[in-house]
């Protein structure tokens, strides 16, 4: 009786924690590099355990999150497991332009804009064995931030000394804002079945939903006598919903090696696009509503997990995910022959976990991923984490650092001679994006 009551208390505590996290997660979104804002971040945060190990999960059991990664691994759960987590995401973006000397020789890059923003991320998953016997089956459900869009750029355009009287130096000419909010979240429901001791299969249905809102505004702070106010604000709200499936296979080659294979079908999300525009010069608002859609490409995943003969246990996993973004379709750019010349994406993930004698795991991860918007831009991420047994479950913490550098067109234009002869106002800027994430989570098996 005492053991049963203790387990029930654990379950109630876990469900309470879940409810609180869902309330927090209702309005959260994680930072997204500018190169990934168009169709969503390629490196979302799911849980402290997963992200600490480089995002691996195709050939590892991840509780209910396996419904998204590879539903075949759900079959490894013989009881029930609850996962919930929270992370703080810090995004730092710096933009640079070249500086030249009087002989028009390149000297160095100088910063023209810097933005620092913080975001919150959440993840939830639950898995439970529902059928025993010759072919046991486990059901899993997860709620994740699949394609976050969140990005924010602010800039104060100031008057340079070379164009104005010294008394007006650094006077703000324009306050500029470009912001994208929203996340395409995914609710996944999957089932995994053991066909025999060495083979499992699984299938999951994924429901995607979210709203992507883009805002571009300029506030004219330096209106000269007789000139029009050039302030404006444009906003576009895109409501997205869609469904796709994930199919997975688990193969146990021997007691030390497991292989995971998964395929996620194309995801088509569609909905209303509501565009509003305001121009101060005419003091006129316009609103228009149209239909739009995205069609995300197929995803192909393959992973291998090796568990060497160590005591205590060590787990090493490596996997590759391939997404042919040339299949990406956007109703704003008609045609299915890749009109935007998007690049196919290869995502390599490596994770290592070692369990100490006191039951505490230590985890390390590495991830290398291409970006779909630019074939020359890629991201490397390094991560680490630890776990600690608490109240019959496992508390996990993770840290993650990633960096991305590339060239991108200015969000807002600059006058050709704005910086004077020492600067060449090129149409592109060097963009450096650095992200640092700290996460915490709790896993309970009962």
Image: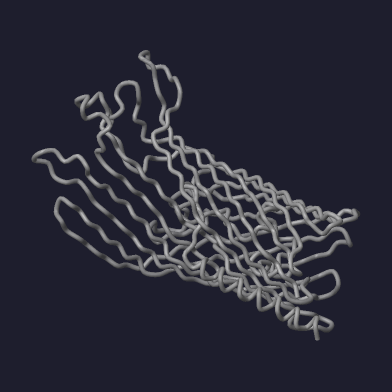
Depth check: give the residue in front, 292 or 28: 28
Q: Position of residue 375 (x, y in %)?
A: 53, 43
Depth check: give the residue in front, 114 or 418: 114
Above/below status of 236 relative to 383: below
The residue positioned 46% from the left and 67% from the top of the image is 210
The answer to whether residue 70 is left or right of residue 145 is right
The answer to whether residue 282 is left or right of residue 162 is left
The residue positioned 34% from the left and 30% from the top of the image is 425
Q: Quadrant of the N terminus?
A: bottom right
- The quadrant in which residue 48 appears is bottom right
Above/below status of 372 relative to 61: above
Q: Residue furthest front?
A: 2
Depth check: give the residue in front, 156 or 341: 156
Q: Position of residue 22 (x, y in %)?
A: 54, 70
Q: Residue furthest bottom?
A: 1
Q: Quadrant of the C terminus?
A: bottom right
The residue positioned 90% from the left and 55% from the top of the image is 311
Q: How is the image coloured?
A: one colour
Q: Position of residue 324 (x, y in %)?
A: 57, 54
Q: Residue furthest top?
A: 103
The residue positioned 77% from the left and 66% from the top of the image is 250
Please tell me how many numbered marks the rendered image carries. 0
The answer to whether residue 204 is left or right of residue 329 is right
- The quadrant in which residue 130 appears is bottom right
Q: Position of residue 443 (x, y in %)?
A: 70, 67
């Amino acid at each position: 009786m005492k053991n049963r009551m203790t387990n029930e208390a654990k379950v109630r505590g876990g469900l309470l924690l879940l409810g609180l996290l869902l309330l927090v997660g209702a309005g959260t979104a994680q930072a997204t590099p500018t190169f990934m804002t168009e169709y969503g971040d390629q490196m979302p945060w799911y849980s402290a355990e997963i992200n600490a190990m480089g995002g691996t999960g195709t050939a590892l059991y991840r509780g209910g999150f396996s419904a998204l990664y590879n539903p075949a691994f759900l079959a490894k759960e013989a009881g029930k497991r609850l996962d919930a987590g929270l992370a703080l995401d810090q995004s730092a973006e710096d933009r640079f332009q070249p500086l030249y000397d009087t002989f028009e020789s390149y000297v160095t890059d100088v910063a023209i804009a810097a933005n620092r923003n913080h975001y919150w991320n959440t993840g939830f998953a639950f898995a439970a064995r529902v059928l025993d016997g010759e072919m046991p089956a486990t059901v899993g459900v997860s709620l994740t931030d699949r394609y976050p869009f969140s990005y924010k750029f602010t800039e104060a355009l100031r008057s340079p000394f070379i164009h104005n009287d010294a008394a007006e130096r650094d006077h703000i000419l324009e306050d500029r804002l470009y912001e994208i909010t929203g996340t395409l979240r995914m609710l996944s429901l999957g089932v995994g079945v053991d066909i025999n001791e060495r083979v499992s299969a699984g299938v999951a249905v994924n429901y995607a939903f979210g709203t992507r809102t883009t805002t571009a505004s300029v506030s004219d702070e330096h209106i000269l006598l007789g000139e029009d106010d050039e302030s404006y604000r444009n906003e576009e709200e895109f409501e997205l919903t869609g469904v796709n499936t994930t199919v997975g296979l688990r193969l146990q080659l021997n007691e030390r090696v497991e292989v995971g294979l998964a395929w996620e079908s194309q995801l088509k999300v569609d909905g209303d696009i509501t565009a509003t525009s305001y121009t101060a010069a005419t003091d006129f608002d316009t609103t228009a509503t149209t239909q739009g859609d995205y069609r995300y490409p197929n995803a192909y995943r393959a992973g291998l997990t090796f568990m060497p003969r160590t005591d205590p246990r060590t787990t090493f996993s490596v996997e590759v995910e391939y997404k042919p973004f040339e299949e990406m379709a956007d109703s704003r750019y008609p045609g299915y022959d890749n009109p935007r010349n998007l690049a196919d994406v290869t995502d390599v993930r490596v994770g290592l976990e070692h369990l100490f004698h006191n039951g505490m795991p230590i985890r390390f991860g590495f991830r290398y991923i291409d970006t779909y918007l630019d074939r020359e831009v890629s991201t490397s991420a390094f991560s680490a984490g630890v776990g600690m047994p608490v109240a019959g479950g496992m508390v996990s913490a993770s840290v993650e650092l990633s960096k991305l550098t590339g060239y991108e067109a200015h969000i807002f234009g600059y006058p050709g001679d704005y910086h004077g002869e020492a600067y060449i106002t090129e149409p592109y800027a060097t963009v450096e994006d650095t992200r640092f994430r700290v996460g915490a989570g709790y896993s309970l098996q009962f």
